[in-house]
Image (cartoon, grey):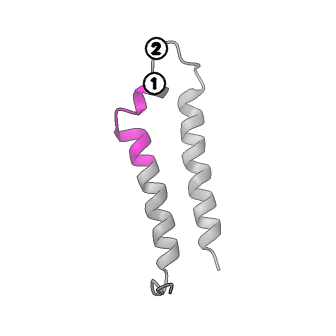
Amino acid sequence: MKQDSGPGGQPVMLSLFVFAVAALLFGSPLRQLWLREGAPWYQPFAVWLGVILLGAWAARRSAP
């Protein structure tokens, strides 16, 4: 049986998911993949765009 997470439970989980993805991309050694020497100039911007789009998706999904 599914438990109700209370009022506002789903938006909080989506926000935490977006935060976790951003922290993983920007704060871990994983960032060496997109900051490596010889990478295209737009690669860091593409990563930022992905995080922004993920946040917009989470905000849109949690809107009433």
Q: Quadrant of residue 31?
A: top left
Mark 2, residue position: 37
Q: Which residues are magenta?
A: 22-32
Identify which residue is drawn at 46% across, 86% down: 3
Identify which residue is drawn at 45% across, 83% down: 5
The amino acid marked with disc number 2 is Glu
Vertical arrangement, residue 62 with respect to residue 45, above or below: below
Question: Looking at the rendering, in which quadrant would you find the C terminus?
Answer: bottom right
Magenta stretch, main secondary structure class: helix
Q: CA distance from mark 1 to mark 2?
A: 7 Å
Q: Residues within 10 Å of mark 2 (few under 14, many from 20)?
A: few
Q: Quadrant of residue 40?
A: top right
Farthest residue toward the top?
38
Q: Based on the picture, tell me whether residue 38 belongs to the magenta stretch.
A: no
Q: Based on the picture, tell me whether residue 31 belongs to the magenta stretch.
A: yes
Q: Secondary structure at mark 2?
A: loop
Q: How many marks?
A: 2
Q: Which numbered circle lies on residue 35?
A: 1
Vertical arrangement, residue 21 with respect to residue 63, above or below: above
Q: Position of residue 13 (x, y in %)?
A: 46, 69
Identify which residue is drawn at 63% across, 74% down: 63
The amino acid marked with disc number 1 is Leu
Q: Position of residue 16 (x, y in %)?
A: 43, 62
Q: Position of residue 38 (x, y in %)?
A: 52, 12
Q: Are marks 1 and 2 in contact (CB under 8 Å)?
A: no
Vertical arrangement, residue 61 with respect to residue 42, above or below: below
Identify which residue is drawn at 52% across, 72% down: 11
Q: Residues within 10 Å of mark 1 (few under 14, many from 20)?
A: few
Q: Position of residue 4 (x, y in %)?
A: 48, 87
